[in-house]
Amino acid sequence: MIPRLRPDLGWEELAAALRISSSGDVARFEAAFAREMGQNHAVAFPYGRTGLMLLLEALGLSGREVIVPAYTCVVVAHSVMLSGNRPVFVDCPATDFNMDLDAAESLVTERTGALIATSIFGYPVDLDRLERIRRRHPQLAIIQDCAHSYGARWKGRPVNREGVAAIFGINISKLITSIFGGMVTTDDEGLAARLRELRRARVREPGLSKTVKRLAYLVAVYPAFTRALYPLVHGLQHAGWLDRFVRYYDEARIDMPSDHLVGMTDVEARVGLVQIRRYREILETRLRRAEAWRRLLAGVPGIELPPAVEGATYSHCVGLVADRNAWAEAWARHGVELGTIIDYTIPGMAAYRNMAPGEFPNSTRFAGHIVNFPLGYDVPENVRKGVMPVHAASAGQ
Ligand SMILES: *Cc1c(COP(=O)(O)O)cnc(C)c1O
């Protein structure tokens, strides 16, 4: 069975993790990350969400409204709440997974402190429209959430550089990984200094126990996503045995992991350093696989593929289908596990429902019908030869 995701980790990463090293690995990872992303500063955090929370604080925002997509990772809204601000949710347009920027602009008031632009699934946010918003509302902090997009480009311009700062998630489900971890990049020296100051004040130095936990997690990841062992992992996941490891939210609670203020370990930074060095190769492999899937699925009835977008980086290769469970079952019988990211809207979750009245019809449709095709392995031979589930060859939507 081909798992829905697999981090692109080789022996070099494992060797780097196990190496005894003098300190300074986190700073080295930050420098390499900033250079690869073409920015002056990168500041590392235990999670992307910790970075976003402290970024909002570093921007001096408190008691303000922050405009965020309704259709994005729920940890974004949690970061806004726990920074002492309030999210204002915006639906997607009918044909695009990214937040509707016209609707977003119409929600800007004197209470608004920031707007979090997101390039969901690696589809670049429209930087021309964003630039118009920035010109009309110069007081608004525009933050790029690049956890899905990394170096996605809009008309050749990398999205991460078009805002006051960008945040990245670097866990095993992202384009590159440092086991866990997050990064904030910026070209603003003062902001970088404030972020480091806040980190010094609020994030504890990691101890030996976190290092050991992260190492153990990394070592477990290698066999877990091999084709031979994955069926077992898949079974345990379905039985709920791995919830402690794979569930990243509880729909009724606004919280963060208990170690969200315990710093990135040197082990994570060393793995991240190898990954950032391999970043372009990893990205090219993903692009090639996403394009192969999209070519194969283009003629298949019953699936709606988003149009190709120049500069997209495909954190996920997605399509929309009427009956997601039927598709997942049929593909599983063909040895392919489909993912279902993102299968919720944030304002539809119990924790946010009362805070966000209104309808989010496009986000809701995407949440209910999205499937992701795996990018951690090449498209399997049988599928490449046109052997596909029966429903895919016949059923209409
Ligand atoms: C993963 C992710 C983040 C940050 O995630 P962490 O798990 O906190 O590192 C932020 N935004 C989006 C859209 C994400 O997918």
Image (cartoon, grey):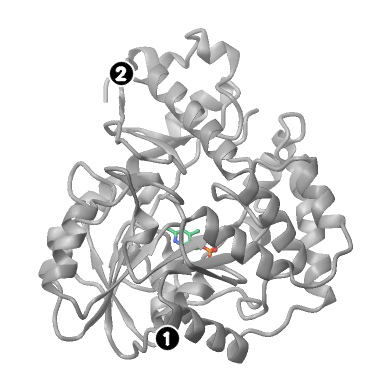
Res 167 → quadrant: bottom left
Looking at the rendered image, the quarter that the N terminus falls into is: top right
Mark 2 or mark 1: which comes first in sequence? Answer: 1
Asked if residue 359 can be seen in this view, the reply is: no
Q: Residue at x 39, y 24 (%)?
A: 294
User: 17 left or right of 227?
Assistant: right
Which sits in the foreground, 29 or 148? Answer: 29
Label 2 CB-ligand 1 distance < 8 A: no
Q: Tell me the amino acid under the disc marked 2.
A: Pro
Res 320 → quadrant: top left
Q: What kind of element bears circle 1?
A: helix
Q: Position of residue 54 (x, y in %)?
A: 48, 81
Q: Nearer the viewer, mark 2 or mark 1?
A: 1
Q: Tell me the amino acid under the disc marked 1.
A: Glu
Mark 1 crowd level (few <14, some 14–19, many ≥20, 10 Å Cα): some
Q: Position of residue 111 (x, y in %)?
A: 19, 86
Which sits in the foreground, 378 or 319? Answer: 378
Does the CB distance between marks 2 and 1 fall below 8 Å? no
Q: Position of residue 304 (x, y in %)?
A: 29, 29
Res 202 → quadrant: bottom right
Which residue is tagged 2? 301
Which residue is tagged 1? 57
Which sits in the foreground, 57 or 305? Answer: 57
Which sits in the foreground, 215 or 149? Answer: 149
Q: Which mark is residue 186?
A: none
Q: Residue at x 18, y 53 (%)?
A: 128
Q: Is residue 349 above or below residue 189?
A: above
Q: Position of residue 266 (x, y in %)?
A: 75, 67
Q: Is residue 57 above or below residue 170?
A: below
Q: Is residue 325 above or below residue 47?
A: above
Q: Residue at x 34, y 13 (%)?
A: 394
